[in-house]
Amino acid sequence: MENHTMQRSDVVSRNRPRPVLMIPLRRCGSHALRLRLNFNPEFYAPYPLHIVDFMPLVELYGDLRDDRAYFQLIVDVVGLQTVSLVKWPNVVFEPEEIFNAIKDGPRSVHRVLWELLFQTCAKRGARVVMDKSLDSVHYAGELMSLFDDMLFLNVVRDPRAQISSMNKAIIHDFDTLLNAMTWVKAYEACKKLADTYPERVLTIRYEDFVSSQEAVLRKICSFFGIEYFPAMLDVSRSHEARKISVMSVLWESNAKAPIPANIDKFKKALSLDEIAVIETLADEFMDYYGYEKLTTRSVVITPAMISAARKRSEANKLQAWADLKESNYHDYQLRKFRADYLRMVRERLHEARWNEGSSRVA
């Protein structure tokens, strides 16, 4: 269990960069924005660690007020960074240094992650650092208690297009209903955050970025307090964009300008029944963000539908891993390596708890 007894926030400081979290859900065009903003030397957003995948393990460390438990957590988060699909260039973290830097403040896995980000950003001479771990929107409250200057970049995308993209991504479920439910949950958290802290959240629509890149990028830069650079419009000049575009089919478009015609690509990928499911679940948000519906009927979602969707998704996910192994062995192995690392950490923590319990009984 994470320690919440320390309430002191990491107040605005000249000694660290300003933190920004991009929200609320992956497959929204987030890399396109991250890679372009990185042209400004005052800003840095490395490839995200997606700490959300680590969150189920945190309670297994026990009380983080115990220095041993907190140090082990730090070691394992540093390990997560080393098994990331895209390495952070020219960075090597020493767990002892991380521990000494943050041991006297509020203890949290988020504080560990952000210390890695702060140190990386500082070494580059930047003053604004962004984490593109969009799913962390569900931990926004804790992040704001840690950093009282935290900002949020809310990147909204048409749910039909985003869910169509999610359906093909090995990081998500392989079913429209399940991904639509995930979409709604993330957007609910994001809207609540934006309504409560409007001065901390900038909302942009991905479709507006596609149609007017410069205007949207200028708006984002102004919100972050950094300069807009015309070079941001030519992402082909980004070394990282070129690198990741050949690493995975999920990123192959990142070294090119966005294609406006792809905005409605979902119409060919989704059936009318799937579109109706999405428009039923996302109805409120489609109206709020200005997306016109294609259907008029409302779909009744039943527990049986959800159960069947989960069975389909699991079968399709197994097939997707097998297909990835054949189509892109490098991508497959890098993703498997990360998944194996998380599984290894879980097994080690469970074993340690079992041994501790056994010794107490003895």
Image (spheres, rainbow, N blue to C red):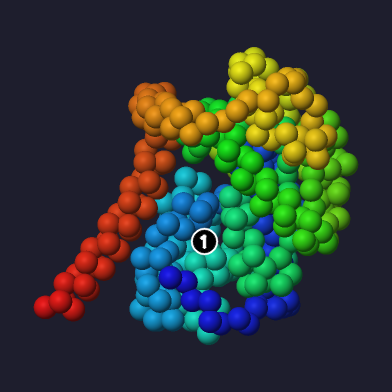
Residue 48: x and y in percent read 56, 51
Residue 211: x and y in percent read 83, 31
Is residue 223 visible in the rendered image? The answer is yes
> Element at badge 1?
loop
Q: Quadrant of the N terminus?
A: bottom left
Depth check: give the residue in front, 162 or 218.
Answer: 162
Q: Is residue 76 left or right of residue 101?
A: left
Per the image, the residue denoted by label 1 is: 91
- When the figure is inspected, residue 358 is found, relative to residue 181, above or below; the finding is below
Q: Residue at x 51, y 54 (%)?
A: 52
Q: Residue at x 49, y 28 (%)?
A: 305
Task: Identify the amino acid type marked 1.
Answer: Val
Residue 243: x and y in percent read 56, 38
Q: Residue at x 37, y 72 (%)?
A: 62
Q: Image quarter for residue 361?
A: bottom left
Residue 285: x and y in percent read 74, 39
Is residue 35 visible in the rendered image? The answer is no
Q: Is residue 178 left or right of residue 255?
A: left
- When the figure is inspected, residue 143 is found, relative to residue 162, above or below; the finding is below
Depth check: give the residue in front, 96 or 19.
Answer: 19
